[in-house]
Amino acid sequence: MQRYLMNFNTRNMETRTTECLVVGSGVAGLTAAVRLARRGHHVLLAVRDTLSDSNTAKAQGGIAAAFGPKDNPALHLQDTLTAGAGLSDESVSQLVVTEGPDDIRWLADNGAEFDRTEDGQLALGREGCHSRNRIVHSHGDATGAEVARALNVLAAAEPNLRTMEGCYIVDILTHEGRCYGATALWHGRKICLRAQHTVLATGGLGRLFQHTTNPEGATGSGAALAARAGAALADMEFVQFHPTALALPGCPNFLISEAVRGAGAHLINLDGKRFMPALHPMAELAPRDVVARCIFQEMTKANATYIWLDARHIQGAAKLFPMIAATCREYGVDIEKDLIPIAPAAHYMMGGIKTDTWGRTNLAGLYACGEAACTGLQGANRLASNSLLEGLVFGRRVATIIGKTRLPQAASGLYWQEESLAETPLEFVAEDSNRSQQIMSRYLGIIRNASELACGEEKIQELVRRYEGCAAHTPEELDLRARLACDLLIVNAAMRRQESRGAHYRSDFPEKDDTYRKHFSDQRPVYDDAKNINDDNIAAASIGLAL
Ligand code: SIN
């Protein structure tokens, strides 16, 4: 794998130096940044587009937590493990379901407004695979927007926190297993961001596929950056498809929250029949991977690009889900009177940069949290609304561990360079981005098998070869390179897992096989890639974690 994506030399580059570099403005990145700044750390928050562009801001259903009178963390844990299909790490899951409620209280105490019952308790909705009502929500179906708003207000109030919008991280800088920051493109300028601690909270990779609920930036940049720098990744075969995205020609794949099914909506095939009760005891509220697969099979049988979601019998549906109702109305669908055309769409990456319970990667000074990370919580299939929760918990935990960690400064004279990369064949970039999405959707979607995976891998490799040894100069080129790196990681992981588990379904191995009840983790060589090494530098690079 090519180590760097641009020609640069940190000795003569515009350089910013900070204590903590946080990349990404979703719930995990903002939580980490705000909490670090509040502890007095200097934080630089690098955001690729604007602060308001994140998967978090688009989240509808909410945040799962055991607040209900008949609920408790043990039940939430059990549901998380069931959805995770044998691959969720029990101790990590335990930690998240136990600590999560306090993180939600912290957010509410700091300005986030959640929907409440008349007596002031949190109003709790229901989503797939949850045995209790435990989804905390805001403005009905605009929870993510409220979480993002509240965290952005907190971030803006922190004098120790500087934000750089339009900042695309290009490469992580490492030396002897330690991360020292990153290079970036900032409004077309190459810059070096030197940092003691670097936190990747770059979100997911739904944009690798043609149909996705994710925003433009979800191209797997974090996983690609980490892999090139030698960080370990895990569980890359597990891509979650949300069962119900709006499927109308010419309209974006707008999410129709699982909370709509939680409120009683039914899935109806094109023969007008409800099919889920015959397929799973939890019917429409079965684990997400099961529902997505059943919908896909109905679509395949009918040779159609959608089936229906029926919310017509839900009293006051438009009031319960105002954003969904308004968006559907824009496209001519009245959710109280019409059937809603839906299809599964790529939604969430369970795998990612492998971390411990403090968000630490295998590279000292490099952390990951949120969807970019693989903490072990999500297993083979994430339980609905556990992702904002994970972002809050691990954003805080990363901030805590950074506060307790002393890493040596980079020795003076340590620099990084790459000056041998060729020009990218620009004429292919847009076409190859589309092509890679087609390949991923065709060969690595909801149902996979060995021959299709092999075919997909060959086609991805063809694209990868075109850019080998080339520099990327624009966000579009960087996105394409991130896509291709993640495409390869996913296809390799999917080929290796010869069983069906959670979101990874192989028609040639349709059963779970417990010899595969383990995580596959890819770790590339950690590059010894800094220059000008002398005795001082070597001493400075020996890492000590003071916990
Ligand atoms: C939804 O509202 O259905 C999405 C929630 C999630 O992905 O956890």
Image (cartoon, helix red, strand yellow):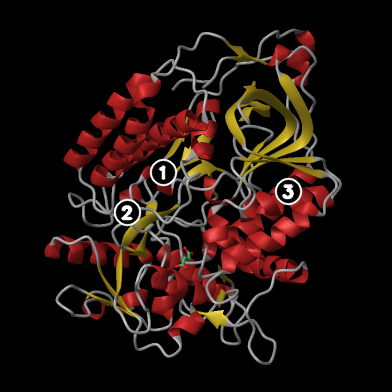
SS type, badge 3: helix
Evaluate if marks 3 and 1 touch, with contact meaning CB atoms under 8 Å apart. no
Whether residue 170 sits left or right of residue 20 in the image: it is left
Give the total number of marks visible in the rendering: 3
| Quadrant position of the C terminus in the picture | top right
Q: Is residue 23 above or below residue 55?
A: above
Badge 1 amino acid: Met
Q: Which residue is mark 1?
A: 236
Q: Position of residue 394 (x, y in %)?
A: 64, 54
Q: Indicate which disc, 2 or 3, sits on the residue closer to the N terminus.
A: 3
| Quarter of the figure with residue 65 | bottom right
| Mark seen at residue 514 | 2
Residue closer to the observer: 128 or 193? 193
> At x 48% / y 27%, what residue is drawn?
524
Q: Which residue is mark 3?
A: 33
Whether residue 11 sits left or right of residue 431 in the image: it is right
Label 1 CB sits under 8 Å from any ligand 1 atom: no
Residue closer to the observer: 33 or 516? 33
For label 1, the crowd category at 10 Å Cα-Cα, with few meaning under 14, some 14 to 19 and many 20 or more, is: many
Q: Position of residue 81 (x, y in %)?
A: 46, 65
In this rendering, which labeled residue sits more in front, label 2 or label 3?
3
Q: Position of residue 469 (x, y in %)?
A: 43, 15
Q: Position of residue 328 (x, y in %)?
A: 40, 71
SS type, badge 1: loop
Q: Is residue 479 above or below residue 161?
A: above
> At x 33% / y 31%, what residue is drawn?
432
